[in-house]
Amino acid sequence: PLVILERIGDPDNLGGIFRNAAAFGAGGVLLSPGCCDPLYRKAVRTSIATTLQIPYAVVNEWPNGLIALRDCGYTLVALTPKNTALELHRYRLPEGSSGAAFLLGNEGDGLTAAAMSLADYRVRIPLETIVDSLNVATASGLALYHARGLRDHAELRGV
């Protein structure tokens, strides 16, 4: 899987997302303009230096650059807390897809409407009503863990 970040402003969150990407075998991280710098000292420290190991790039043509990713066979999966979205544990990678590309948005505002409109799927992590959302780094870890389970399951089936 890939991780795509839109306007992540907190270096601790960015570092945590890179750490999760390394832990669950993500192929790389794509950043929108407006994300904080992965090489900022606090991001590097929080990531346990995985910002120096995981491939990343800035998508300057945002959000239209995501179309090129879809053209390469990736499925764009937007994480959102909206109740109308598919629950993450029900999401399955479509046959023929090169992999999931998880879109995660800004800590306060989430994904922009423009980025959300390009998503092939909208998924949510079901929560108890006492909490309306998770920290973006935590959400990235859960999504990547789910993708790893899907990949492991496919390998067991010989796919």
Image (cartoon, rainbow, N blue to C red):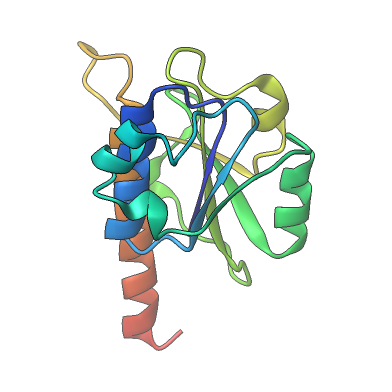
The one of 43 and 158 positioned closer to us in this rendering = 43
Q: Is residue 134 left or right of residue 53?
A: left
Q: Position of residue 115 (x, y in %)?
A: 67, 31
Q: Position of residue 11 (x, y in %)?
A: 37, 28
Residue found 74% across the figure and 34% down from its top: 62
- Relative height, residue 79 to residue 52 (above, below): above
The one of 100 and 6 positioned closer to us in this rendering = 6
Q: How many marks?
A: 0
Q: Is residue 139 left or right of residue 75?
A: left
Q: Position of residue 83 (x, y in %)?
A: 44, 22
The one of 139 and 128 positioned closer to us in this rendering = 139
Residue found 30% across the figure and 63% down from its top: 149
List the single residue furthest toward the bottom.
Answer: 158
Residue found 44% across the figure and 50% down from its top: 91
Residue found 72% across the figure and 55% down from its top: 70
- Relative height, residue 104 to residue 90 (above, below): above
Can residue 5 be seen by looking at this rendering?
Answer: yes
